[in-house]
Amino acid sequence: MGSRTASPAETEHRSRRHNLVLLGIGSLVVAVDQLTKWWALEALDDRDIDLFWTLRLHLVHNTGAAFGLGQDLDTVIAVIALLFVAVVAWASWGGRRLSLSPVLLGMVLGGAVGNLADRAARAGDGFLGGAVVDFIDLQWWPVFNAADSAIVVAGVILVLTASRHRQSQPADEPDEH
């Protein structure tokens, strides 16, 4: 089986499809994240909701990183998230097709944008100093939100698929990525 080089039109079509999937998934994550945070702010302001076992809905305003880590690093975390969003946009729309799944990349991008929106829109000190709304509480893990979930799930899948890809390559073939 010989491989042929894709025509410029095929490459452009793949790139456009990649970007549309990335934007669609990212937008969906932002929408779900912001809607669930809006609901949490309304419904959990003065109460918790116990669901089952240790899972409860409990409102927390997080000025740190994911899962409440890095409470004093809110500006650094926001700048890193902004840089990530900028790099993905530059790579995707600058004609460079990222070799990562657009679905997984869209999940990470949407999660980053969802939490950045909180930092920008919620009262806080300084540049992007607002608190992120977290409300999913397992009571044995730090409280988190839909954006955090999307980032972590996509990140784990990306790591697992990358490690499986490396394991499946013969030792004499160089890694193409």
Image (cartoon, rainbow, N blue to C red):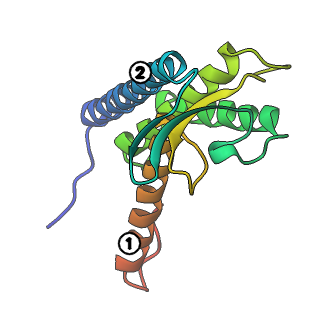
Look at the picture and state if 143 lies above or below 134: below
Dot 2: within a 10 Å radius of its alpha carbon, few (fewer than 14), some, or many (20 or more) residues? some
Q: Secondary structure at mark 1?
A: helix
Find residue 140 and report its horizontal and vertical position in percent.
56, 57
Which is nearer the N-term, disc 1 or disc 2?
2
Q: Foreground residue, 49 or 34?
A: 49
Dot 1: within a 10 Å radius of its alpha carbon, few (fewer than 14), some, or many (20 or more) residues? few
Q: Residue at x 57, y 54 (%)?
A: 141
Question: Quadrant location of the N terminus?
Answer: bottom left
Amino acid, disc 2: Ala
Amino acid, disc 1: Arg
Look at the picture and state if 170 lies above or below 47: below
Q: Residue at x 41, y 21 (%)?
A: 31
Quadrant assignment, res 85: top right
For this orientation, the residue located farthest to the bottom is 171
**Residue position marked by numbered label 2 in the rendering:** 31
**Residue 174 disc label:** none
**Residue position marked by numbered label 1 in the rendering:** 164
Q: How far apart, in angstroms, are the residues tagged by discs 1 and 2?
A: 32 Å
Q: Foreground residue, 97 or 151?
A: 151
Q: Nearer the viewer, mark 1 or mark 2?
A: 2
Q: Residue at x 51, y 32 (%)?
A: 48
Could you tell me if the residues under marks 1 and 2 are in contact, i.e. CB atoms within 8 Å? no
Quadrant assignment, res 107: top left
